[in-house]
Image (cartoon, rainbow, N blue to C red):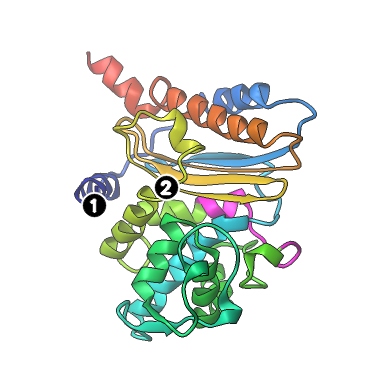
């Protein structure tokens, strides 16, 4: 998987295309027509990695990002490691006050044990472990994460608490911010190409695949991170489509049914993937060459 991501990134970073996508409005309209009426709120942002073209639906509305905020936390860990503040082999000691309910193995670990920062980052992304996340945010510093995200161009991403179960009204982000961050990751623009490849690989191995990856062929690499809380279902990811790689970020809230929210995200993903394989610049170029 890592070699695959390295190969894909090397192709995309080395490509300089400026094609226009006149059908982008058509994609936006198709998605709008698919959204369930009276079910809840959906915000999304789509970005073509090669051209930088994008569109959004309520993509600047800032809301509780739930576990999607773990992407900026991961990025900050790589930024500070590159600055020499620590090594990923350094260890942090688990305190009882660090424990936050949720998925992953850390909540059940014995207080006083120490874990490498690498292990915590992996569990935060692979299993969406809230305890690992709290340990990392407290270690890295909310103020440092917020400042570095602003420096990367994220204007609506704020971490006010390291306890993601108490983050309502304290942690914020938007689908536009997440798409900016993931676009930079996909092109190797944060820390280094190697660091971005490692982060993309971590995300491609996370176990929650019900959203964006669900509607994409299994052979396509999808690096995504979901977010789930009461009334909230999010998914943000990089889809390394062979014809036209892209970033899609989708936030949903206040749906009457969790199943409907998940289905909406999956359906949007399906529409976007199919569109990139039939209407995108690379798909059109391939068709003309035949």
Q: Residues within 10 Å of mark 1 (few under 14, many from 20)?
A: some
**Viewer-nearest residue: 226 or 244:** 226
In the rendered view, does 261 fall on the left or right side of 49?
right
- The total number of labels drawn is 2
**Is residue 172 rendered magenta in the image?**
yes
Locate residue 123, reporting x and y percent. 42, 63
Residue at 51% from the left image edge and 76% from the top image edge = 135
Q: Is residue 82 visible?
A: yes
Query: Which residue is the site of mark 1?
Result: 2
In the rendered view, does 236 fall on the left or right side of 123?
right
Quadrant in which the C terminus appears:
top left
In the rendered view, does 166 fall on the left or right side of 122?
right
Query: Which residue is the site of mark 2?
Result: 207
Q: Quadrant of residue 282?
A: top left
Q: Is residue 143 visible?
A: no
Q: Residues within 10 Å of mark 2 (few under 14, many from 20)?
A: some
**Viewer-nearest residue: 216 or 283:** 216
Locate residue 113, reporting x and y percent. 42, 82
Residue at 50% from the left image edge and 68% from the top image edge = 108
Report the Cα–Cα distance between label 2 and label 1. Answer: 16 Å
Task: Point out the stretch of residues depicted in magenta.
Answer: 168-179
Labels 2 and 1: the sequence-earlier one: 1
């Amino acid at each position: 998987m890592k070699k695959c991501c390295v190969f894909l990134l090397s192709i995309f970073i080395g490509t300089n295309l400026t094609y226009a996508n006149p059908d982008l409005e058509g994609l936006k309209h198709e998605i709008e027509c698919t959204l369930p009426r009276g079910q809840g709120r959906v915000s999304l942002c789509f970005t073509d990695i090669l051209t930088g073209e994008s569109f959004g639906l309520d993509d600047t509305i800032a809301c509780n990002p739930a576990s999607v905020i773990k992407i900026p936390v991961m990025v900050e860990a790589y930024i500070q490691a590159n600055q020499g503040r620590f090594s990923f082999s350094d260890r942090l000691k688990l305190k009882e006050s660090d424990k936050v309910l949720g998925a992953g193995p850390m909540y059940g670990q014995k207080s006083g044990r120490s874990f490498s920062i690498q292990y915590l980052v992996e569990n935060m992304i692979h299993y969406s472990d809230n305890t690992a996340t709290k340990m990392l945010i407290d270690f890295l510093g909310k103020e440092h994460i917020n400042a570095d995200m602003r420096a990367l161009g994220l204007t609506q991403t704020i971490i006010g608490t390291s306890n993601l179960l108490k983050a309502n009204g304290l942690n914020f982000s938007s689908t536009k911010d997440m798409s900016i961050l993931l676009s930079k990751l996909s092109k190797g623009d944060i820390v280094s190409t190697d660091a971005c490849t490692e982060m993309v690989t971590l995300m491609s191995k996370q176990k929650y695949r019900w959203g964006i990856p669900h509607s994409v062929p299994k052979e396509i690499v999808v690096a995504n991170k979901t977010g789930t809380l009461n009334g909230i279902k999010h998914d943000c990811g990089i889809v390394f489509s062979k014809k036209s790689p892209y970033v899609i970020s989708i936030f949903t809230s206040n749906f009457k049914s969790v199943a409907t929210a998940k289905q909406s995200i999956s359906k949007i993903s399906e529409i976007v993937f199919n569109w990139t394989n039939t209407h995108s610049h690379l798909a059109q170029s391939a068709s003309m060459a035949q």
